Amino acid sequence: LSESRGARPIVIFDSGLGGLTVVAEIHRRFPREELVFLADRARVPYASLSPALITRYAVECFDYLSRFDPKVFVIACNTVSAVCGEEIRARYSAPVLDVIAPTADAAAATTKSKRIGVIATTATVRRRAYDTALAERLGDVQVFSQGCPLFVPLVEEGWTEGEIPEKVVEHYLREMASSRIDTAVLGCTHYEYFRSHIQKYLGAGVTLINTPEVTAVRLGEMMERFGLSREDGRIGDVTIYSSDITEALYTVAGSLFEMNDSDHPVRVLPADTAAREVIV
Ligand code: DGL
């Protein structure tokens, strides 16, 4: 029984390509697992939408993803985790892992000064998701939050290197750089693509929590606890579905995965016709 449960896929969602950083880390740590990912690129960015619409879109996507019979759902999107994580959790029987809890745990375990930066979408900042999670863990913590709306479209364009991303990092993080934080959270999975620029700008005195890593570790603990690991020796497939496919998707996926390796297929597929009815 446990092998048949273990053989089911881990199903991962993000509004766009940020979640691929989480998929890549899960694949690196647990290469035998079957991974299914959906990016709702037709409607990204979610963060500029109302909470009601974010919830509607996210639920539509998770309803679609239910057809893959997931053994675990991973919400690889801070915005969806912050706005409607509870609704998603209550709606499905599969266990749901979001990115906020493991990231907040890691930040709480890392900080000495209890001065923590949260670099996130404006929706996550407005929801005070990390303020609440960090206060629960640390009590008297000081959180310095910054929304960075231009990061998501840059990633969706595949534009993560060079002078423009560097300038955008500087523009958004100027105030945070002088706030004497010792730890910062990249509270949007898209921002992972700017990790090295952000680290360089904030300086070596600031520890940047690695959300893909801490989420993958937590996922491993969950699979262990529920007896859900895949025993099969074969390398698992990674299937990337998207509600819209453009060249940039291949560029970004190609920066994270070996795309033309027939032994370890990483496939990009359109969310199918049935999905399109639901999603677009
Ligand atoms: N990757 C998503 C997150 O972690 C965000 C993006 C969006 O605005 O759609 O928050």
Image (cartoon, rainbow, N blue to C red):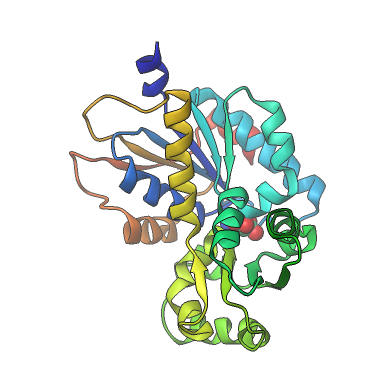
Q: Nearer the viewer, residue 213 or 106?
A: 106
x%, y% of residue 210? 47, 61
Q: Residue at x 31, y 36 (%)?
A: 237
Q: Is residue 234 left or right of residue 130?
A: left
Q: Quadrant of residue 60?
A: top right
Q: Residue at x 73, y 43 (%)?
A: 84
Q: Quadrant of residue 243?
A: top right
x%, y% of residue 249? 43, 56
Quarter of the render that holds ligand 1:
bottom right
Is residue 133 visible in the rendered image? The answer is: yes
Residue 34 sits above or below residue 173 on the image: above
Is residue 160 visible in the rendered image? The answer is: no
Quadrant placement of the C terminus: top right
Residue 10 sits above or below residue 83 on the image: above
Q: Residue at x 55, y 31 (%)?
A: 65
Quadrant placement of the N terminus: top left
Q: Residue furthest top?
A: 1
Q: Is residue 217 left or right of residue 107?
A: left
Q: Nearer the viewer, residue 209 or 12?
A: 209
x%, y% of residue 192? 48, 65
Q: Residue at x 61, y 34 (%)?
A: 62
x%, y% of residue 96? 59, 34
Q: How many marks?
A: 0
Q: Is residue 179 left or right of residue 126?
A: left
Q: Is residue 123 left or right of residue 114?
A: right
Residue 55 sits above or below residue 154 on the image: above
